[in-house]
Image: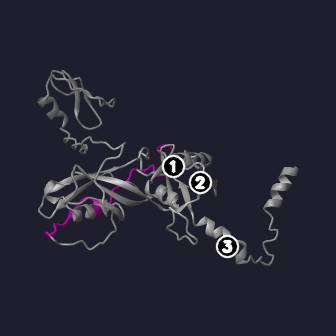
Amino acid sequence: MSEEIWYDLQYLVLGRDDPELFIPHGTYTGVLSRNRLSIIGRVLNTREQDLRSVIQVFPRLWGLSSRVHGRILSDQYVQFRFCSEVDLISVLQRAPWMVNDWFVALQRWQDFPDEEFLSSIDLWVQIRGIPLPYVSELTVRFIADTLGPVVTLDFNDETTNQIVFIRVKVRLGITDRFRFFRRVRFETGERAMIGFEYEKMRKICSNCCRINHHSSYCPFLAPQIPDEESEELVVPIWEEGQSSNNNHAEESHHSQSSDISSYSPISQPPKPVSPMLFDEECVEAHHGHKFSSSSTFRHEFSGSSTDNSLKKIGINKLGDLRWITL
């Protein structure tokens, strides 16, 4: 009984209608200046990432155990306070960081954060499959812009020594669906299948392709229907010397794969299943043969021929003849 009364008292409106208390600026001036040398972190998968583990693991990963202090702010946010600007910048430059194989979004402290604060994460993306005649900075930017704003392009037509893939750092929304392939068509009429490989990514929802939950807890259980306008990307062809309309800040680095990047070729989408034959056509075309299939779905019926020799026909769920017994 006493516990019930205590819970009821907590939710009573006690003091909410009292005059507000004014707090002078001098009481928190020092705190604001110290917080400016800190990073706010947001765990993306609260079911898989424990906040206490985050504030204990990250300083060790950064090699700053004695120079960084972490603390929990809420059920999804943590704060890391640094002793020097150099250490803070070093951590941000080596992002993204993960705990328990799931990403943690990090961003520098803002006194008055906007609504976009900690709503995105910068990831290196390897773009593969661009045909050689169209490999250029403008082409890469045009394709990468469909994923998100381009932060850095790790490509220079004069100095880059490999173009098996081209690395681009892209700003991606933490609640957005991730794309791994994109069909493109160039103005010349040539088509290609472009692949996207996200460096350091280890886990993602296999149902909706988002990075903030496991497939076991996916709220998007219905199959995703792609937008008609995103079926095929038309890539223009630029003349030599023509500049891009978008001026993005970039850093000059040589393209290289991360430790977890894969060099295997991009697998192409499966070919569509051939149209189903009518039952009589199947019997005539495949008289007396057996077909192997992994499907367990069967359709059985009795034949109407004069010799009554047709007994059963098995058809799998894809519409292909499975086996015939005559």
Q: Residues within 10 Å of mark 2 (few under 14, many from 20)?
A: many
Please state which of residues 263 and 29 is positioned toward the viewer in this rendering.
29
As helix, strand or loop, the secondary structure at mark 3 comes to helix
As helix, strand or loop, the secondary structure at mark 1 comes to helix
Res. 247 image quadrant: bottom left
Q: Residues within 10 Å of mark 3 (few under 14, many from 20)?
A: few
Tag 2–tag 3 contact (CB < 8 Å): no
Q: Earlier in the sequence, mark 3 or mark 1?
A: 3
Residue at 51% across, 66% down? 117
Residue at 16% across, 29% down? 283
Residue at 16% across, 61% down? 186
Residue at which label 1 appears: 62
* Residue 307 in the image, given as x and y percentages of width and height: 15, 21
Res. 289 image quadrant: top left
Residue at which label 3 appears: 29
Residue at 14% across, 34% down? 281
Instruction: Give the magenta part as a residue range.
Output: 215-240
Residue at which label 2 appears: 68
Which secondary structure type mostly characterizes the magenta part of the structure? loop
Give the spatial CA distance, label 3 vs label 1: 29 Å
Tag 1–tag 2 contact (CB < 8 Å): yes
As helix, strand or loop, the secondary structure at mark 2 comes to strand
The residue under label 1 is which amino acid type?
Trp
The residue under label 2 is which amino acid type?
Val
The residue under label 3 is which amino acid type?
Thr
Q: Residues within 10 Å of mark 1 (few under 14, many from 20)?
A: some
